[in-house]
Image: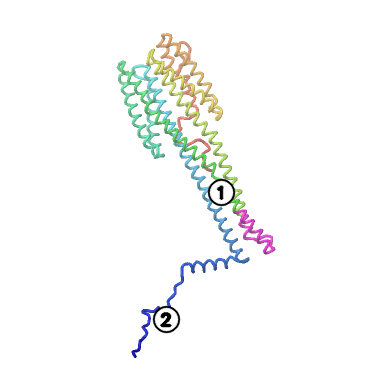
Amino acid sequence: MSQQTAIPPANPKPGTPAGQPATLPTVKGRLGEASDSARRAMSGTPGRLRVLALLTVAVSLIFAVSAFSTFGSTDDALRRGEANTSQLVRIQAIHTNLVRADAHATNAFLVGGLEPAAQRADYISSLSQASRLIAEAARNQPADGPALGALNDSVLTYAGLIEQARATNRQAMPVGAQYLRVASSGLRSDALPILDALVKANEARVTAEFGNAAGASPAFIASGVLALLVLLGGMGWLSLRTHRYVNLPLAAATAAVLVTLAIGSISLATIGSRVDDVRTGSYAATLATATARIAAFDAKSNESLTLIARGSGSAFQKAWESSSEVVTARSAVAGRLRPDAAKLGGLWVNYAETHALIRKADDGGQWENAVKLATGSGATTAGAISANAASAAFRVFHALGLDRAGAAGPAGMSRS
């Protein structure tokens, strides 16, 4: 009989006895061991103490992150609100300077020949300030850049037409009036709508940032209350287990959270109150005064354009009436909000009375007398005060120092 020899298994795993299959732990087995270890670590009083420690650390960290995020976002909102408010005032200053330049250009055109040097200087100053502020606004708010570029093109076109109107007016050529009307109507149809859109966009930004600054506290308060509940609950549980009424580490943490929550809530409430005061006070007053001033210059331009049209200026007179309504309404708002603007309405009434005399003279066939009333700088031979002397567009708004607008936002936007 032949003998058979047993063949050993190939490549046995080192350390594994011959004839026994190698075994590897499964993933399920490792997870089970970890789960059992965690249950043993968290079981009993020592385990519950570990859970309490982890929970208190977690809620404290959540509160700390929430506090940091809340105050950081509030500060950022105030910074953006201040920048957007300054941009809004800057845009309105551009608007004001453009309609002011047009008021000077149209009024000087009535004189004929070489316009008064003072009015020419005011026209050049207003146009240069508008151009400077356009460049400054584009640097400070890139989002407004494309619109400001289009605005600058419109301003250059307007300035070119005004120069053509001046040149032909000095030569007593009737076409000069047409150049002037085209320039003024182009300013209102091309440039001013761009400014209106920019004002609305920046007002929306300011309103949004005001809201962000005033409404940043709910998450902070909620996380603080949660931390306090967990810490107080932990101290209560420990007092039952250890018969010690105060646990110093937990008591210190509770006190720190409570003080931070109290001081933070008061600070956020103060910021919110200040933002509301600015929004309904100095900010609203600045917008109302600027709107009134823009409408006043626009009314003065339309007064001159009505006379330049010589009997066919009814559309300009209607535009004057619309602007006058805006001045009256916004002056009343500004007068309620800032004491130094309380006289706006009364002074505008004085100018409106002189404007009524101008219209009476023009409609009665006394065009030269109407022009004297519209272009003079003091009392006329008839004893009436000229429109330039009575116009709030050239007296009240200068007195309020609003020609320096654009350098900063309304008072009260400081974060301090």
Q: Main secondary structure of the magenta part?
A: helix
Disc 1 to disc 2, how far (Cα)? 67 Å
Q: Is residue 7 above or below residue 136?
A: below
The kind of residue on which mark 2 rests is Gly
**Mark 1 element type:** helix
For residue 184, the mark is none
The residue that mark 1 highlights is 220
The residue under label 2 is 19
Given residues 58 and 292, the one toward you in this image is 58
Residue shown at 44%/15% (left/top)?
A: 373
Stretch in magenta: 227-255
* Helix, strand or loop status at disc 2: loop
For residue 335, above or below residue 20:
above
Chosen colour scheme: rainbow
Residue 37 placement (x, y as % from top left): 54, 68
Q: Amino acid at mark 1?
A: Phe
> Residue drawn at (32%, 24%), measured in percent from left and top?
161
Q: Residue at x 49, y 18 (%)?
A: 352
In the rendered image, the residue lying farthest to the top is 365
Q: Nearer the viewer, residue 364 or 370?
A: 364
Q: Height in image: 376 above or below 98?
A: above
Mark closest to the chain's N terminus, 1 or 2: 2
On the image, the x and y values in percent for residue 205 come to: 46, 38
